[in-house]
Image (cartoon, helix red, strand yellow):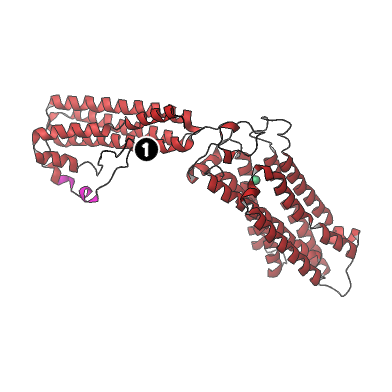
Amino acid sequence: MDKLKIKEMEDLTSSPVDARLLKSKLEKLAENDSPESRDSILRRRRGVTFSEPASHQPQPNIKNESEEKVPRKQSKSRTPSFSSAELDRIMTDVKARAEEMMGNAGAFVGKANELACNYWNEASGQAGDIARYVKEGAEAARDLAGDVVASTKEHGKELVSKVIETSEQTVETVVETAKFVWEQWKVCDFKSLPDWLQDNDYLHLGHRPPLPSFKECFRSIFRIHTETGNIWTHLIGCLMFIMVTTYFWVRTDLVFDTKEKIIFTFFFVGAIGCLGLSFTFHTVSCHSETVGKFFSKLDYVGITLLIVGSFVPWLYYGFYCEYLAYVIYLSLVITLGVASMIVSLFDQFSQPEYRSIRASVFICFGATGVIPAIHSAVSMGWLNSIYQASLGWIILMGVLYIGGAVLYALRIPERFYPGKCDIWFHSHQIFHVLVICAAFVHYHGISEMAVYRMSVGECTSEVEVS
Ligand SMILES: [Zn+2]
């Protein structure tokens, strides 16, 4: 990080520690009265202790529970009285400190925004510290006002209420400002991203910076950036499949037995798993390099789940009367699924330069379905297989999946319009939408196969024809 900027950040961070000044002011006043009254003031500080930081980095406040339990009534009896002149001075001081704190917080907002893109990690850390310190300072001002109130009832309500009002406003404004600092981040251009977030250089602007907080990552769902479309397409798809699954299990007009429902559920679990893991990956991918890598692996595991889950009901109904073929093909699919999962667990697999290899692995895995498709077409006749094995729907599904994967691998259309598809219509979003369409086409296909099976009844010794 730029050393000059760090210095500026440190100056800003350490300057609002006005709480210490307020504390020393209060101690001075208390010393003029008696050691007991000074002690009583310190005891009533709501447990907020301002210790000298070990370095220029702000330190978190330490709460002393035993002190907090001291009843306020007891200490009140030892509270010092202030003269009107002292009260005026205190109130002016509170106001001045409050303004200074707000000024510092405002300056920090500007600085944090400026640094947010390139150095979000550092900026957010500083924001957290400053937020804490500004809040402590504001609380100290409020406590000071509380002390004044407790000891100077006889000096006039107006003055007291002014002090309270000023302090309360300070607390509110400063806490709000601190929250604002913490929550703000701006999208950045591709070149400002750290290496581990640089995936698609055809998308020029609108990238999320690293957001090292899961809460912030999930809040980014509601912001517009390069991942917004990726997140929402698969979030909505996942919710749709959860609803379809629920409806499938609770509807009473279907005559599926439990075994068939379980067979369908393999597909539903694959679809929900794939879309859910993809949604999660796209949401938290900017958290940190480690988290991003871990969830990208889960994303690939989800794709494998969907492919395996799609094969299960299709093979079940496609080879309903050829049990041996069903077992052989299912074993092949499970073996390939496990192999794909192992390959996708390698760190290199998620690197941008392996984009085409990734797409090829999943395309080849899905394409192994051609073998059982030809097998069933030959054994029952091409025309029959269109009805019995929903061949048309399966081919459409294949076209959608492969089409999506090719667009993803070649990064079309952003390759031809660099910087024009940053937020909407880039290849990854189109791929996501095609995956959802393909999954629904598959659901329709296997439903038709199941309906056909119910209409013809159990197997006869011969291969059936419609
Ligand atoms: Zn994706």
Answer left or right for 462 relative to 68. Answer: right
Question: Residue at left 48%, top 42%?
Answer: 212
Answer left or right for 381 relative to 202. Answer: right
Return the x and y of residue 267 as percentages of the image width and height.
69, 59
Q: Nearer the viewer, residue 305 or 268?
A: 305
Question: Which residue lies under the disc numbered 1?
Answer: 129
Question: Residue at left 9%, top 32%?
Answer: 32
Q: Amino acid at mark 1?
A: Asp
Is residue 66 in the magenta section?
A: yes
Return the x and y of residue 363 as percentages of the image width and height.
75, 51
Which quadrant of the figure shows ligand 1? Answer: top right
User: What count of labels does the image hold?
Assistant: 1
Q: Is residue 181 visible?
A: yes
State whether residue 359 is above or below residue 201.
below
> Main SS type for the magenta part?
helix
Quadrant where the C terminus is found in the figure: bottom right
Q: Is residue 241 visible?
A: no
The span shown in magenta is 65-73
Q: Residue furthest front?
A: 3
